[in-house]
Image: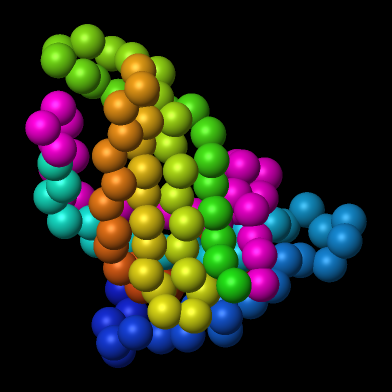
């Protein structure tokens, strides 16, 4: 895969969902960079993550944003736990917000996303 690196691009141009009844639902493949984030209780390492915006995988596609809310597995203090993950990506600016919550604690980090070109899955 090759990452498109021509600054901030308008993610509104990533396309729309396939016509109703069409099996292909992937809208976009994005690569998102998140910096290190921490609170007194938690640390979230800097990361570069790849997301396939796919409604079959739980993503919601709005006019202005892509979003995901669901469970995820995390390691906290050496123990595997289930946490809640929320991601919102602006289709206009590519700005992303990721929030991880577990046990009454939460940590939010902001990052930036770029469209990936893919020779595999079509979108």
Quadrant of the image containing the C terminus:
bottom right
How many numbered marks have been drawn onto this rendered protein structure? 0
Q: Where residue 16 appears, x then y in whole percent?
A: 69, 72
Q: Is residue 26 left or right of residue 37?
A: right
Q: Does 105 appear above or below 12?
A: above
Q: Where residue 109 appears, x then y in whole percent?
A: 27, 52
Q: Which residue is more in the foreground, 114 or 65?
A: 65
Q: Where residue 58 appears, x then y in whole percent?
A: 61, 42
Q: Is residue 88 left or right of residue 100?
A: right
Q: Residue furthest top?
A: 79
Q: Residue at x 72, y 57 (%)?
A: 24
Q: Residue at x 76, y 66 (%)?
A: 18
Q: Does 31 appear above or below 71?
A: below
Q: Is residue 119 left or right of residue 108?
A: right
Quadrant of the image containing the N terminus:
bottom left
Q: Is residue 61 left or right of residue 44?
A: right
Question: Is residue 57 located in the magenta-colored stretch of the structure?
Answer: yes
Q: Residue at x 69, y 57 (%)?
A: 25
The reply to whether residue 48 is in sight is no
Q: What colour scheme governs how the chains and residues are painted in the rendered image of this protein? A: rainbow
The reply to whether residue 84 is in sight is yes
What's the magenta region? 39-63
Q: Residue furthest right?
A: 21
Residue 32 sits in which quadrant? bottom left
Q: Does 55 appear above or below 71?
A: below
Q: Where residue 73 appears, x then y in whole percent?
A: 37, 23
Q: Which residue is more in the foreground, 37 or 58?
A: 37
Q: Which residue is more in the foreground, 44 or 1?
A: 44
Q: Which residue is more in the foreground, 91 or 104?
A: 104
Q: Residue at x 30, y 46 (%)?
A: 108
Question: Is residue 64 located in the magenta-colored stretch of the structure?
Answer: no
């Amino acid at each position: 895969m090759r990452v498109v690196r021509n600054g901030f691009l308008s993610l509104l141009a990533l396309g729309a969902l396939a016509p109703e009844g069409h099996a292909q639902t992937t809208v976009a493949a994005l690569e998102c960079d998140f910096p290190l984030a921490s609170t007194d209780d938690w640390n979230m390492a800097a990361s570069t993550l790849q997301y396939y915006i796919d409604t079959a995988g739980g993503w919601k596609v709005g006019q202005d944003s892509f979003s995901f809310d669901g469970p995820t597995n995390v390691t906290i203090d050496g123990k595997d736990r289930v946490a809640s993950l929320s991601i919102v990506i602006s289709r206009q600016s590519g700005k992303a917000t990721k929030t991880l919550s577990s046990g009454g604690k939460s940590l939010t980090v902001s990052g930036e996303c770029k469209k990936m070109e893919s020779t595999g899955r079509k979108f």
